[in-house]
Amino acid sequence: MSVDQGVFRPASVDEAVSVLARLPDARLISGGATLVAMINARLIEPAALVSLAGVDELHGITENPDGGWRIGAMTRHRDVAAERRFTGTLALVQQAASLIANATVRNMGTIGGAIAHADPGLDYPPALVAADAQIEIASGKGRRRLPASEFFVDWYATALQSAELVTAVHLRAASDGVGLYHKLARVSGDYATVSVALTMSSGVAGIATRAAMGACGPTPILLEEANALLSGSPGESELNRAGELLAAAADPVDDVRGSAEYRRLLIPRMLARAFTEARAAIGART
Ligand SMILES: Cc1cc2nc3c(=O)[nH]c(=O)nc-3n(C[C@H](O)[C@H](O)[C@H](O)COP(=O)(O)OP(=O)(O)OC[C@H]3O[C@@H](n4cnc5c(N)ncnc54)[C@H](O)[C@@H]3O)c2cc1C
């Protein structure tokens, strides 16, 4: 491993973990899109940086034999946005990546850095929760995996412990259905005011829907009760009730992107729009 002016350059995950264990005040740097801005604004002053750029296993997207996918933590947003193999219910992950900020940020930022930062306005978290993705985490004790719904725990807080890092995001094989990610932002390229991620597939018992709302609280909001209402043969009253439940579970902030009240109003409307679009797409295929 090389070290140059306070920047460690490990060649493996084990080397990165051992630096983090030895230097608790060191910070990982992936794309640097957020970290460098935080350092420049003097919000943080890391004792050292640990660059993940030279760790080969963290780069790229690979298909597993079972049809699932492994997205390495260092995979740039632009590469996920360009990934046309995420079809059916997984299309929402590609859509979320393509709506992140602008081309400059998509060229810099990585999926691992984004989810580790856990800004509640990010585009990946609701998409990964709706897709039932798993987050792979490395530490000195080895690897563990957590469902995305358990990875995001609070405002800018994740289940990562000290000296742990995100190594990959795992996606299940796509079902033959629809995956949608809708983002409402003040202007193109801004963080979401509210977002909705939704997967829908159809079977003998009717449709199966899994929806998560983003930017409406500290973590993405997914409610099993709402998903049950949106599955089977839901009508307008079930759709309305699911929207009410999600709005009641939200804990939005008042900020420059919108008031808490405005965000609560948007939740049922955005859910209904995504649901209706997904059902029309399913109908067109059945
Ligand atoms: C101007 C601007 C606009 C943006 N707009 C949007 C937007 O609309 N939607 C959106 O979703 N995002 C947006 N982002 C955030 C963007 O997605 C960043 O890519 C992301 O926040 C950080 O990714 P990064 O790879 O650059 O991480 P870095 O900046 O390198 O790191 C971010 C944090 O994560 C830690 N970290 C990095 N990698 C790992 C890892 N593998 N394991 C554990 N910890 C790690 C770092 O120590 C640091 O604390 C925006 C960012 C900027 C600068």
Image (cartoon, grey):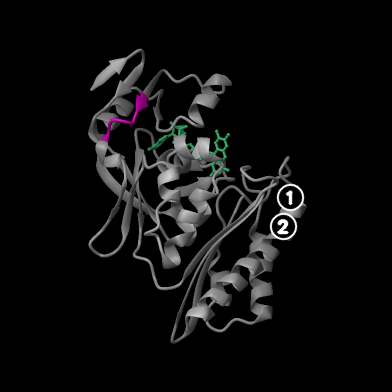
- x, y percent for residue 183: 61, 54
The part of the image, by quadrant, that contains residue 112 is top left
Is 8 above or below relative to 125? above
> Which residue position holds label 2?
264
Instruction: Please tell me which residue is depicted at 70% across the width and 46% down the height of the picture.
Output: 186
In space, the residues marked 2 and 1 are separated at their CA atoms by 6 Å
Horizontal arrangement in the rendering, residue 254 relative to residue 60 (left or right): right
Instruction: Please tell me which residue is depicted at 33% across the width and 31% down the height of the picture.
Output: 53
> Which residue position holds label 1?
260
Horizontal arrangement in the rendering, residue 168 relative to residue 252 (left or right): left
Q: Marks 2 and 1: CB-CB under 8 Å?
A: yes
Amino acid type, mark 2: Arg
User: Does the beta carbon of the residue at mark 2 sit less than 8 Å from ligand 1?
Assistant: no
Residue bounds of the magenta highlight: 50-55
* The stretch drawn in magenta includes residue 51: yes
* The stretch drawn in magenta includes residue 208: no
- x, y percent for residue 14: 23, 34
Instruction: Please tell me which residue is depicted at 45% across the width and 20% down the height of the picture.
Output: 46
Dominant secondary structure of the magenta stretch? Answer: loop
Amino acid type, mark 1: Ala
